[in-house]
Amino acid sequence: MSSRTLLNIGYGNLVVASRVIAIVSPGAAPMKRLRDEAAKRAKLVDCTQGRRTRSIILMDDDHVILSAINPETIASRFAAEASEAVDR
């Protein structure tokens, strides 16, 4: 996957796909703690546009990104980008 490949995380927000470490659901207590700690460290990016958080994206530089798109949807977009990159 090219370092310039962008991943759509919803509502016009994009992240660099090669920097994504994990895409997780926000419901569990450890994910809530992770989100709170990221906010304290000023590493939280809220891309929900005022909607309910449905996924948390962990980046390689310790940023935590909130998205209103389901993790499965983002993962399928990620897989599609990866397969396109292999085809190129």
Image (cartoon, grey):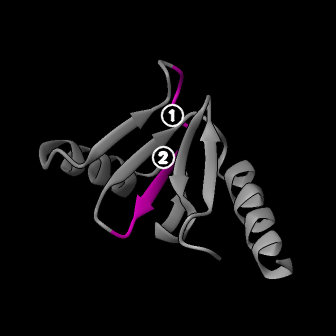
Going by the image, does 74 lie left or right of 21? right
Residue 29, position as x, y percentages in the image = 37, 51
Q: Which residue is mark 2?
A: 26
Q: Which residue is mark 1?
A: 53
Whole-number angstrom distance, CA of label 1 to CA of label 2: 7 Å
Residue 15, position as x, y percentages in the image = 51, 52
Going by the image, does 80 lie left or right of 1? right
* Residue 44 vertical position relative to residue 3 in the rendered view, above or below: above
Q: For numbered disc 1, what is the local secondary structure?
A: loop
- The residue stretch that appears in magenta: 51-60
Q: For numbered disc 2, what is the local secondary structure?
A: loop
User: Quick one: label 2, few (<14), some, or many (20+) residues within 10 Å?
Assistant: many
Say whether disc 1 or disc 2 marks the residue closer to the N-terminus: 2
User: Quick one: label 1, few (<14), some, or many (20+) residues within 10 Å?
Assistant: some
- The reply to whether discs 1 and 2 touch (Cβ–Cβ < 8 Å) is yes
Q: Quadrant of residue 79?
A: bottom right
